[in-house]
Amino acid sequence: MSGQSLFPRLEPLLPRVRKPVRYLGGEGNSQVKPWDDALVRWCLMYPDAYEVGLPNQGVQILYEILNEQPDVLAERTYSVWSDLEELLREHGIPQFTVDAHRAVGDFDLLGVSFATELGYTNLLTALDLAGIPLYATDRDERHPIVIAGGHAAFNPEPITAFVDAVVLGDGEQAVLEITDVVRAFKTAARPGGRTELLMRLARRGLVYVPSFYDVDYRPDGRIRAVTPNRPGVPARPAKHTVSNLDAWPYPKAPLVPLAETVHERMSVEIFRGCTRGCRFCQAGMITRPVRERSIDTIGEMVAQGLAASGFTEVGLLSLSSADHTEIGEIAKGLADRYEGTHTSLSLPSTRVDAFNVTLANEFSRNGRRSGLTFAPEGGSERLRRVINKMVSEEDLIRTVSTAYAQGWRQVKLYFMCGLPTETDEDVLAIAGLAREVIRAGRRASGHRDIRCTVSIGGFVPKAHTPFQWAAQASHEVTDARLRLLRDAIRGDREVGRAIGFRYHDGRPGMIEGLLARGDRRVGAVIERVWRDGGRFDGWSEHFSFERWEKACVEVLEPLGVSLDWFTTRERDEREVLPWDHLDSGLDRDWLWSDWQEALRGAELDDCRWTPCYDCGVCPTMGTQTQIGPTGRILLPLVSTGPSRPGGSSGPSGSGSPGRSADAAAS
Amino acid sequence: MPRRPEGPPPPPVVARVRVRFAKRGRLRFLSHRDVARTFERALRRADVPMAYSAGFSPHPRISWLGAAPTGAASEAEYVELALADHRQPRALGEVLDAALPAGLDVVACAPATATPLAELVDASHWWIRLPGVAPTALAAAVEALLARDLVEVERVTKDGHRRFDARQAVVLMVCRAENDTCAILDTVVRHTTPAVRPDDMLTALCVVAGLRPSVPPEPLRLGQGRLLADGTVADPLMPDRDDAERLVGRIDA
Ligand code: SF4
């Protein structure tokens, strides 16, 4: 019988695995709905370990929106760690949800959210454990429709063999519309089966169904064309854009895990989209235009979320939070409201300016001023023009001087290595910058106990960005430059000891690059790696570059392409890119001209404060930039008094079905 | 010049309450850290007026008693809360119970007495279900263990292996039967250093009689408190009750 709890079979295995708490569910504000009352049943997956996946906002938002529908049920599943995977196989227990421990294969839909490409092998594990055939073409009426979403799904081509459909863009409205189609289809006794359902979803422009498109290749390995293979489906499936974030104030009741997770706080997204125009940033390009939440909605979401969760920290999220038109008022309003309540506020602060320090001061009124983070991204001024990160060395020094003078003890600087046009000198300039930062800090604070951490990631070109044509720097080049930089910093007798240096092995970036810009032929590489034991590729203790390299040689080279072909090869303007048939709203000509501007080192202003530069998004998607100011402020919250019953403070309660009133009588 | 937290010092502690709670069902897999985190969030949701420590990162003043290990259920976990405002303990227990997830359940809540909680607890009563173990096999193993004065066991800790005696701590050990294929180890253990935990007792039974359960055992702490002369333990939240009277009731049950 479908929908039954697997927990009785799972429980005896739990004492034998690491961190059994990962598999218990029971989070505050989680829900278990009766199986038989639901007409449409969604399983949502974040394909990483529970502690990484649970805080994911996308999954939490969709989970709540779907469960608000009376005839819809949504549960969650995460990747099981390898110790449990082995036991599940041994005991014949399928992939299960954490909510009611139901078999994932019993659901109508399996929605998988990919924040990073390195989760692809975990998708295969979950499908296999769930008893769902790996290839979409092998599935029938008994199997869930597998839908991919999330930022990485903007180039889903490498996983098209394994998914039935792909949702591009914001999921809030899209999941409800997909649900409507599935509901009608099930109510009508599934006319035309699986293909007809996918056809209905595709025809309405809700999803991209890869099997409805054929890819032709040229003899040299490049793509000739991607064309629909049946009438009625859009030539270019487009992304979804939610146009009024105030109408979608989710999550209202954040999930409160019993286990420790990577973010021990609640998050409120204060705006979506970014038009700063950093050319490396896929998130900024694919989430345009900027849509702010109003100060009132933000205030309400914080208040409601805290009452429903009991969290002690609130993060105000977005791609560049200091850019909200009313961030000053929001910061002050929230700091006033929560003064003396042992609630801390945080802003992922990466913008380099003194205003950001003021905000950080507001948020740390009574807290320790430990570390501030800034992201100049490029070491030299020339390189920062190439990537359109408009920060001068003077700005940076002024900003960090302010921070150190006001009691901050440590500044963290983020950079990337392997950017287009980069030379050794650009990377070595990071050492000079860090030296000036320490000097400025010592001057500003009057003591020598000043620290700066330089943190460096390898650049991976992504789809739908001006750098989508760029050659990725090989890991040998990146690693060599980082060694030079490390030696330069360590060798600096004046400040070397005050600078911390953090960087990662460049090799996972090559695989991320392969998956980020790969086409359908890369799917066989993923499968080969997975069959060879590849799991949790985002975890350094699991990732094996050799395994990927070997699979690339075996799978790609017979086709005349290779790992290098997909990563370190520069593309020309006319090459058909694997994701060209997916519409992110960005005008391809604009992307190309911005790429050319990058090579010339020309900067581009933000369209929020300067005229529209026709990136294409607003007219294509029928959207527009939505920003304040509203001119409103946050008033102090009226205390509801101590008589408020604790358990019912969340809008959907803290969900303890089956709790008996006599729990106190033992 | 080092910064100091602005504003007045935290309000003083005006009352302390002690809470007995249970860790039941699937929540037995919570570690002590998981329980503590979940408790702190529930206290906030329930608007319990906690007293906080001073300094840059104030934390609510909560004193924990040695927690049941991950995987062990318990009917008798204890914690003491320092309050910045007065609350009726019974009402506090009710709102806290409502705010805690099902499975972490408040059993009782009482004002703290002058004797520190830790001094009211020196032994635990464990009820360890052993599915797949025949009661006859367990009975033999218990007999073998009780016949010894000393049984060394080894535990793997963060800092390597540690050997210690698990026998001296055992006050009482009885084999009970759920049915022919499920034995129950009913035992009272004194709190020693290091604490002898259910898995240590099972290791000891393995050492003396080769007992190796094929299915993971299910330990349950039924009670902890002061060890009484008859080998039972007294609930630390009921120090005023006539111990003799309470014990009669327990034995009758
Ligand atoms: S279309 Fe114009 S206004 Fe809209 S995001 Fe692009 S540049 Fe900005």
Image: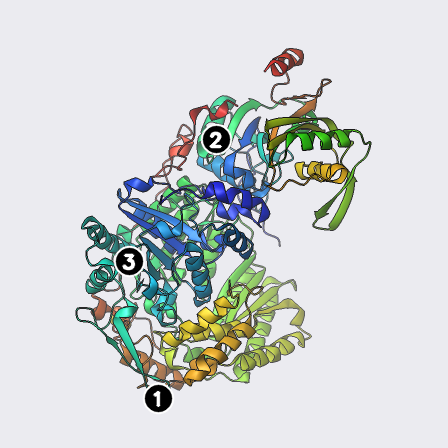
Frontmost of labels 2 and 3 is 2
Q: Nearer the viewer, residue A132 or A25?
A: A132
**SS for callout 3:** loop
Quadrant holding the N terminus of chain B? bottom right
| x and y, in percent, of residue A613 in the image | 27, 75
Frontmost of labels 1 and 3 is 1
Q: Given the image, on which type of amino acid does mark 1 rest?
A: Pro
Q: Does the rendering let one see residue A472?
A: no
| Mark 3 crowdedness (10 Å alpha carbons): few <14, some 14-19, many ≥20 | some
- The vertical placement of A214 against A268, above or below, is below
Are discs 1 and 3 located on one and the same chain? yes
Q: Given the image, on which type of amino acid does mark 2 rest?
A: Leu
Q: Kindly identify which residue carries mark 1.
A: A219
Q: Given the image, on which type of amino acid does mark 3 rest?
A: Gly
User: What is the distance, in whole Å, between disc 1 and disc 3 at their CAs?
Assistant: 53 Å
Q: Kindly identify which residue carries mark 2.
A: B96
- A381 lies left or right of B166: left
Instruction: Tell me the quarter of the picture where residue A36 sits.
Output: top left
| x and y, in percent, of residue A35 in the image | 33, 42
Q: Nearer the viewer, residue A335 or A291?
A: A291
Asked whether the residues under the numbered discs 1 and 3 touch, taking CB atoms below 8 Å apart as contact, a structural biologist would say no
Q: Quadrant of ligand 1?
A: bottom left
Q: How is the image coloured?
A: rainbow
Q: Kindly identify which residue carries mark 3.
A: A628
Mark with earlier residue (1, 3)? 1
> Residue placed farthest to the right in the image?
B149
Q: Does the rendering let one see residue A413?
A: yes
- B216 lies left or right of A262: right
